């Protein structure tokens, strides 16, 4: 029972940290926008806090997020690849390297000779 409570507390704490981070990022976007954009672009208006949060959401939709990962393999996938590599024999590793060398090269096709 005690372990469940600590897990729930950690989830709640993580949620609160995400909300606090979003609030701080919204304030940063608002401050930077209001400091830079009106002086940089003639006619640019200042924005309020909620528009800054909306701008963050728009960036998330258009550019895919604020985190640096997501395009590469996860740590579980990396671990699985490493385990498979460790289980290979030297001959299997050499064969893998030969196959990998040809991945980005165009395949050589043998020209058919007409008889």
Image (cartoon, rainbow, N blue to C red):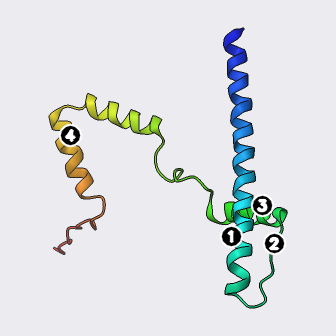
Q: Which residue is at a point 69% across and 48% down the rendered structure image?
A: 21
**Secondary structure at numbered mark 2:** loop
Residue underneath mark 1: 32
Mark closer to the chain start, 1 or 3: 1
Q: Tell me the mark number nearer the camera, choosing from 4 and 3.
A: 3
Which quarter of the figure is the N terminus placed in?
Answer: top right
Relative height, residue 89 to residue 37 (above, below) = above
Label 1 to label 4: alpha-carbon separation: 52 Å
Mark closer to the chain start, 1 or 4: 1
Relative height, residue 35 to residue 6 (above, below) = below
**Secondary structure at numbered mark 3:** helix
Label 4 to label 2: alpha-carbon separation: 58 Å
What x and y, as percent, mark residue 35?
70, 75
Cβ–Cβ under 8 Å for marks 2 and 3: no
Label 1 to label 3: alpha-carbon separation: 13 Å
**Secondary structure at numbered mark 1:** helix
Residue underneath mark 2: 47
Q: Callout 3: few (<14), some (14-19), or many (20+) C-alpha neighbours within 10 Å?
A: many
Residue underneath mark 4: 93
Q: Callout 4: few (<14), some (14-19), or many (20+) C-alpha neighbours within 10 Å?
A: some
Mark closer to the chain start, 2 or 3: 2
Q: Residue furthest bottom?
A: 42
Q: Tell me the mark number nearer the camera, choosing from 4 and 2.
A: 2
Cβ–Cβ under 8 Å for marks 1 and 3: no
């Amino acid at each position: 029972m005690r372990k469940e409570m600590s897990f729930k507390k950690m989830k709640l704490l993580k949620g609160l940290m995400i909300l606090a981070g979003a609030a701080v990022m919204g304030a940063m976007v608002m401050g930077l926008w209001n400091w830079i954009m009106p002086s940089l672009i003639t006619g640019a208006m200042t924005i309020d806090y909620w528009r800054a949060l909306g701008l963050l959401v728009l960036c998330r939709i258009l550019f895919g997020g604020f985190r640096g990962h997501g395009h590469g393999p996860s740590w579980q996938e990396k671990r699985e690849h490493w385990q498979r590599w460790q289980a290979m024999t030297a001959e299997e590793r050499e064969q893998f390297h030969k196959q990998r060398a040809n991945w980005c090269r165009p395949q050589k096709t043998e020209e058919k000779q007409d008889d």
